[in-house]
Image (cartoon, grey):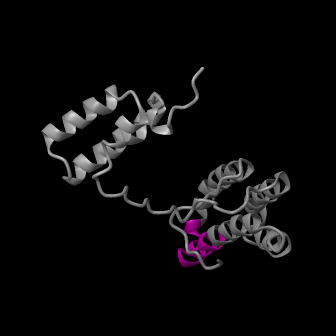
Amino acid sequence: MDSSYAVGDLRVSDAEREPVIERLQDAYAEGRLDHEEFDLRMHLAMTAKTRNDLGGLTRDLAPEPKRARDPVAWDGEPPTAEDRMLASAAHVVAVPTLFVGPLVLMLLSGKRSEYVRRQAAEAVNFHVTLLLLTIVTFGIGGIVYSVAWILSAIAAVYALTGNTFRYPWILRLVK
């Protein structure tokens, strides 16, 4: 068996073709390629046999644009099981205690875990917003609390899976 092949001479897989095809589609959408050149490069990408063949198709295009980072996405270290449970509890305990339960969790457990603090702060903000809505509408906004139970349950499930949840249409008073 001959192992003297250069990396560029190795055969490509479909998984290696996908990013190149996506980049060609983006370049076509940006107007960097006309229709005939796009068709030709797509054909060459689909029939490329080696990495060198594939790499030459996008070499003269501008670098791929940077994607905007999702401000909601959790980019810290993965939360532990205890962190996920506490974050979930912050959302659930808010139903009977309004904002007091999540505030206590945020102040006590938030010092140990940024994930718990962010999720508890989100629950505090949501329930403070609901309380202000109820006060401003002289109690009529209390009807919205039935929706709050559903959203709190959804947020708790998100927190249990280690994902972040942002309640829609709330005042974010606590960061």
Q: Is residue 74 magenta?
A: no
Q: Quadrant of the C terminus?
A: bottom right
Q: Main secondary structure of the magenta part?
A: helix
Q: Quadrant of the N terminus?
A: top right
What residue appears at the point 32 percent right and 26 percent down from the top-left corner?
A: 47
- Left or right of residue 11, residue 57 in this image: left
- Residue 129 within the magenta-colored segment of the rendering: yes
- Comparing 47 with 155, the one in front is 47
Going 30% across and 42% down the picture, which residue do you hit? 57
Q: Which residues are magenta?
A: 127-141
Q: Residue at x 57, y 24 (%)?
A: 2
Q: Residue 118 at x, y = what percent?
A: 69, 68
| Residue 59 to residue 5: above or below | below
Image mark count: 0
Q: Residue 105, image x and y in percent?
A: 82, 69
Q: In the rendered image of this protein, does residue 174 appear above or below residue 10?
A: below
* Image-quadrant location for residue 4: top right
Residue drawn at (26%, 49%), measured in percent from left and top?
27
Give the x, y percent position of residue 77: 73, 60
In the image, farthest residue toward the top = 1
Query: Quadrant of the rendered structure where residue 93 is?
Result: bottom right
Task: State the residue in front, 66 or 166.
Answer: 66
Task: Out of 122 and 127, give the one closest to the viewer.
Answer: 122
- What is the x, y in percent for residue 173? 61, 79
